Image (cartoon, rainbow, N blue to C red):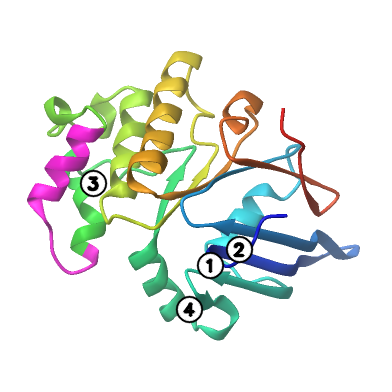
Amino acid sequence: MKTEGNAVIRARQVGKSVVGPEGELKILDAVELSVNAGESVAIVGASGSGKTTLLGLLAGLDLPTRGEITLAGARLDRLDEEARATLRAEQVGFVFQSFHLLPALTAEENVALPLELNGGVDAARVDEVLALVGLTARRRHYPRQLSGGEQQRVALARAFVTRPRILFADEPTGNLDQSTGRQISDLLFQLNREHGTTLVLVTHDLALARRCDHVYRLDGGRLREEAAA
């Protein structure tokens, strides 16, 4: 059994419910998860199974209805919204399926934005991550002038520019063709391998999931680890 001594993410008996017209709807139920520093973890499951909800809880974007989550050593339920935002800014990077780039900013400016929000832009660091994702020559282009794969590489550079300990990725290849998706997934695992960044991703792509150290399936609100292929 995997030990929790080096865990950077830990969920214990986590549940999430919402109230709808027909009463309480249980999305997650008694979820247990431990992710150690430097590991790569995939969460798979059917559409609507709660994968994105779980990712948001693990990252402190929302709080569970029941149970507790520890992120980078901090119990999220013991932090107010501002403290959780500070923790994310210092420890976490995000990559989303729909890129979420600001259209009025160039690739370079989109990548620099997290640094600016944290108090100051490190031009050398922006140069470094743009080179890492192969976009030095496209740095002054706006999102509309970039392909989908290039936009996702900008999003990945933006997520990594603050040197996060943990990288969350929600369907990072979902809007990309197979070849481009492979390039993006290669970059994700390169960051995980070469920089020790903990990677937690949600995906429908089982081939991508199987590249991770651990694969968990969410079904009926419960999370279980899949046997190694």
Q: Amino acid at mark 1?
A: Gly
Q: Determine which of the numbered discs, if any, sits on residue 57 in the image.
A: 2
Mark 4 vs mark 3: which is more N-terminal? 4
Gap in Å between the C-alphas at discs 1 and 3?
Answer: 22 Å
Q: Secondary structure at mark 1?
A: loop
Residue 3 found in image quarter: bottom right
Q: Amino acid at mark 4?
A: Glu
Gap in Å between the C-alphas at discs 2 and 3?
Answer: 25 Å
- The answer to whether residue 101 is left or right of residue 65 is left
CB under 8 Å between discs 4 and 3:
no
Gap in Å between the C-alphas at discs 2 and 1?
Answer: 5 Å
The verdict on residue 131 being magenta is yes
Using a 10 Å C-alpha cutoff, classify the residue at mark 1 as few (fewer than 14 neighbours), some (14 to 19) or many (20 or more). Answer: many
Q: Which one is nearer the viewer's eye here, 209 or 77?
A: 209
Whether residue 106 can be seen here: no
Q: Determine which of the numbered discs, if any, sits on residue 141 in the image.
A: none
- The residue under label 3 is 111
In percent of the image, x 64 and y 60: which residue is there?
34
Q: Secondary structure at mark 3?
A: helix
- The residue under label 1 is 60
Q: Which one is nearer the viewer's eye here, 148 or 42?
A: 42
Mark 4 vs mark 2: which is more N-terminal? 2
The correct choice, above or below, for 177 with respect to 213 in the image is: above
Magenta-tinted stretch: 117-132
